[in-house]
Amino acid sequence: MESSAAGVFCSRMLSMVNREDVNAIVQAQRHMLDRFEKTNEMLLNFNNLSSVRLSQMTERYLNHTRALVEMKKDLDSIFRRIRTLKDKLSKQHPEAFNSICKSVDVEDDEFDPNPKSSLPLSDALEQSSDSSNTSPTLLTPGASGDSEDTSLIKEQVDGHAQLVTEGGGE
């Protein structure tokens, strides 16, 4: 070897580095590289599985949403038919229809567990702002005092509560 300053410097630098330490560092880096590659593979598999599951759940969600929309359309159609039948009955038999409406209003006031004055503000506003609400509220058979009725449907039509009786009641 040359005894120049550069040669001396290089040889001293090389003698300062322990080859065993360098080999240990290289081994640790290879081990970490293997672990990172395995982790990366696992994450890719997880992402692929997640995307497949997401697409399946999205499809199921859309199917359930379509079913709910169809059910709502069907219910709206049914309530529209019921309103039409009620209107026809009220025009054909106005005296009987009015007497039933008055007796239902009296019964409603007697058995209403939450009178309008004690409702929270949001519920009171909701009831007063939506006078065309025709969605039914199911009552238990014993709620009106008639144990013979199998089910009662309470409807809010034009601001008046009306009961439609289905089953063995009058």
Image (spheres, rainbow, N blue to C red):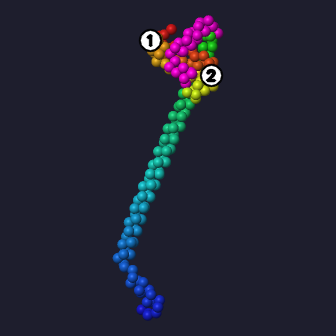
Give coordinates of residue 34: x percent, y percent.
Answer: 40, 63
Question: What residue type is disc 1 on?
Answer: Ser
Query: In the image, which residues are magenta?
Result: 91-119
Against 121, residue 13 (above or below) is below
Q: Position of residue 139 (x, y in %)?
A: 49, 19
The residue identified by callout 2 is 131
Q: Judge from the rendering whether residue 53 lies leftward or rightward of residue 85; answer left or right.
A: left
Which residue occupies 63% across, 25% down? 129
Q: Secondary structure at mark 1?
A: loop
Examine the image and state in which quarter residue 24 appears.
Answer: bottom left
What type is the residue that disc 2 sits on? Ser
The image quadrant of residue 157 is top right
At 44% across and 53% down in the image, what residue appears? 45
Q: Main secondary structure of the magenta part?
A: helix
Residue carrying label 1 = 147
Q: Is residue 108 magenta?
A: yes
Give coordinates of residue 64: x percent, y percent.
Answer: 51, 34
Q: Residue at x 42, y 65 (%)?
A: 33
- Residue extending farthest to the bottom is 3
Using the image as rendered, state which of residue 89 and residue 9 is in the foreground. 9
